[in-house]
Image (cartoon, grey):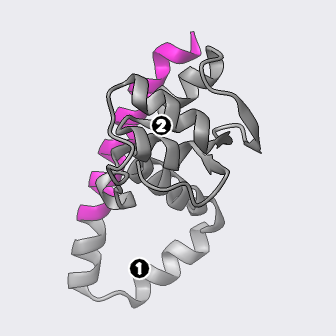
Amino acid sequence: MGQRAFPFVDATFAAEMLGVPVADVLQWVADGRLTSYGGKERNPFLRTVQVEELGREMGRDPAEPPVRRRASQNPVRRVELRLRHDAKWSDVSEEDLQAWLREADAPSRAAAEKVARTAVDRLNRMLSLLAPSRE
């Protein structure tokens, strides 16, 4: 887990230090195993020393560097980023769509249709997965 450069780390970095998903770190905070010190609800700050102690309990070598994953390698982050970007569709009006359609060439329209169909499929799947949580 390396040398302690900062007294606090966020939950995302703590997950990298421990080699676990962020959801596990947040659960440990909820269970009182880790204590949060401000920050965002879904990414609170944690004492580095406490995270390192938990890592030792889990059998992690303190000298082992954190497992860094780029957003593109993290499925949770990838979905969050996609949802955030797709939220901007509310800024696009019917007039905007019609103007784009008038000016787009055939290859652009074909590519857009493929992307839109894939997006609709994924979003419909997301809605079906979220449906049980609304009950």
User: Can residue 130 be found in the magenta stretch?
Assistant: yes
In front here: 33 or 27? 33
Q: Position of residue 3 (x, y in %)?
A: 48, 56
Query: Principal SS element in the magenta part?
Result: helix
Query: Few, some or many C-alpha atoms within 10 Å of disc 2 (few <14, some 14-19, many ≥20)?
Result: many
Residue 88, above or below 132 = below
- Residue identified by numbered label 1: 101
Q: Furthest-right residue in view?
A: 38
Residue 6 placement, left or right of 126: right
**Identity of the residue drawn at 41% across and 90% down:** 103
Q: Secondary structure at mark 2?
A: helix
User: Can residue 20 be found in the magenta stretch?
Assistant: no
Q: Position of residue 128 (x, y in %)?
A: 39, 25
Residue range highlighted in magenta: 114-135
Residue 91, above or below 33 = below
Q: Which mark identifies residue 22?
A: 2
Q: Are marks 2 and 1 in contact (CB under 8 Å)?
A: no
Q: Furthest-top residue in view?
A: 135
Residue 66, above or below 55 = below
Q: How many marks?
A: 2
Give the mark nearer the N terminus: 2 vs 1: 2
**Identity of the residue drawn at 65% across and 17% down:** 32
Quarter of the image where the C terminus is located: top right
For marks 2 and 1, give the CA distance. 42 Å
Residue 89 placement, left or right of 112: right
**Identity of the residue drawn at 52% across and 16% down:** 133
Q: Secondary structure at mark 1?
A: helix
In front here: 69 or 94? 69
